[in-house]
Image: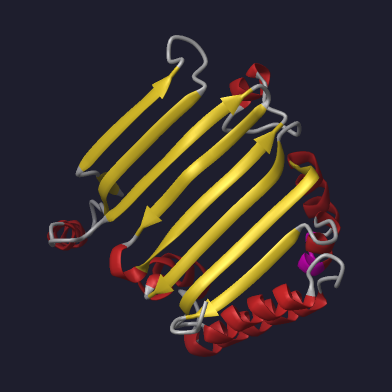
Amino acid sequence: MLVLIERMAWGGAGLGGLPDRLTLALDGIRVVPVSENYPFFEFLGRIEAGAPGAGTDAAFELQIAGETLSLRGGLLDFGAAGRVALEAEIGGLSTQEIARLPGMSSGLTLRQLQLEVTANGLFETVLAPPLLNMLLITSDAPADAFAGAVAEASRIVDAIDAAALALASREAVQAVLDSLPHPQGTLTVSYASPTGLSVAQVILAVALNVEDPARMVSALLEPDALSVTWRPQGAPE
């Protein structure tokens, strides 16, 4: 896989030691498949990558204050297909934790997260190709397998404890699943917790509930910590 970037800009403060602010902007990100056995796909990928308006733009700003890492202005812009905006706050950061990244440590804790996904072809053009290739490439009936996977996801959402996922949020997630494979609208996911969600909690919940995703999610989420909304395209704000 070859990643092409048309333009890149970065800046920061405190770069002489541990930076307390770092900004990065990438324009015109394009991914080209590379295969020694199938050079045609690289040739075709380079042609597609050279199309006007092709590529993805990305930007974010990281801020470090004490033991808190904040992600601000995180954005993946896929043009007409949609965009992903992300902001987050992670606590428990220290120079020792930074030295362990990207392996991460159990001391890191997610305190706040705000995710907004606008889809108008985003699933079909960006998410579906790698996801379905990974899950369904060996299936003799991929359409049926896809429908079965969506139904299983719906069952898992229904099985999550009401305290962990309120009715309005549950209905929003189900509406997104019902719209597949052509979701058009805006999904927002908000998470906020004074105690936060630590890496250690996630590891333990996964280990104890690896065969029961609904129970795993229920164990991780405090009451009212997570909120999900879905606004179909054209619906009033």
Query: Could you say where residue 114 lies in the image, as x and y percent from the top left?
Result: 59, 54
Residue 105 versus residue 135 in the image, above or below = above
Relative horizontal placement of residue 161, taking residue 203 as reference (left or right): right
| Among the 4 quarters of the image, the one containing residue 159 | bottom right
Most foreground residue, 205 or 161:
161
Query: Could you say where residue 234 lies in the image, as x and y percent from the top left?
Result: 44, 84
Residue 131 versus residue 182 in the image, above or below = above
Query: Could you say where residue 170 lies in the image, as x and y percent from the top left?
Result: 72, 76
At 77% from the left and 44% from the top, the residue drawn is 196
At 77% from the left and 48% from the top, the residue drawn is 193
- Start-end of magenta stretch: 210-214
User: How many discs mark residues in the rendered view?
Assistant: 0
Q: Extreme top residue here?
A: 16
Residue 87 versus residue 141 in the image, above or below = above
Relative horizontal placement of residue 26, taking residue 133 as reference (left or right): left
Q: Extreme front residue here?
A: 237
Most foreground residue, 135 or 26:
26
At 42% from the left and 51% from the top, the residue drawn is 75
